[in-house]
Image: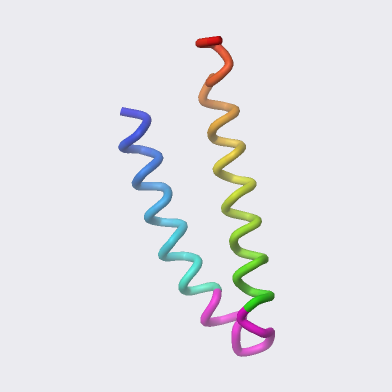
């Protein structure tokens, strides 16, 4: 069940990344916007991974 939830959240973030990249791309270069959004998504995914209790199985 967690996998389905994470897949839905990932799809939402991919969609948001496209919107943010197009909006920020008007002011900054595409590399800057992709890096900024990717880092936020990476941080959030790591946060979900840690909070999901992945250490409990070890």
Q: For this rendering, which residue is in front, 16 or 33?
A: 33
Residue 19 lies left or right of residue 55; in this view the side is left
Q: Residue at x 60, y 84 (%)?
A: 25
Q: Position of residue 37 (x, y in %)?
A: 60, 64
Q: How many marks?
A: 0
Residue 24, placed above or below residue 17: below
In the visual, does 48 lie left or right of 6? Answer: right
Q: Quadrant of residue 34?
A: bottom right
Name the image colouring.
rainbow
Q: Residue 13 lies in magenta, yes or no?
A: no
On screen, residue 43 above or below 26:
above
Measured as percent of width and height from the top left, residue 11 is found at 37, 55
Residue at the image point whose x is 60% and y is 39% from the top: 46
Screen quadrant of the N terminus: top left
Instruction: Please check the rendered image and state whether residue 27 is part of the magenta-colored stretch, yes or no.
Output: yes
Q: Is residue 32 above or below residue 47?
A: below
The spot of residue 21 in percent (x, y) is 55, 76
- Residue ID at (46%, 72%): 18
Query: Residue 26, relative to residue 16: is it above or below?
Result: below
Residue 39 spot, x, y in % from top left: 65, 56
Q: Residue at x 56, y 81 (%)?
A: 23
Numbered range of the magenta stretch: 21-30
The residue most toward the bottom is: 26
Quadrant assignment for the C terminus: top right
Judge by depth and name the residue closer to the eye, 52 or 57.
57
């Amino acid at each position: 069940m967690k996998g389905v939830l994470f897949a839905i959240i990932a799809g939402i973030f991919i969609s948001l990344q496209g919107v943010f990249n197009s909006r920020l791309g008007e002011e900054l270069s595409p590399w800057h916007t992709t890096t900024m959004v990717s880092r936020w998504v990476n941080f959030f995914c790591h946060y979900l991974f840690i909070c999901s209790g992945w250490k409990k199985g070890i």
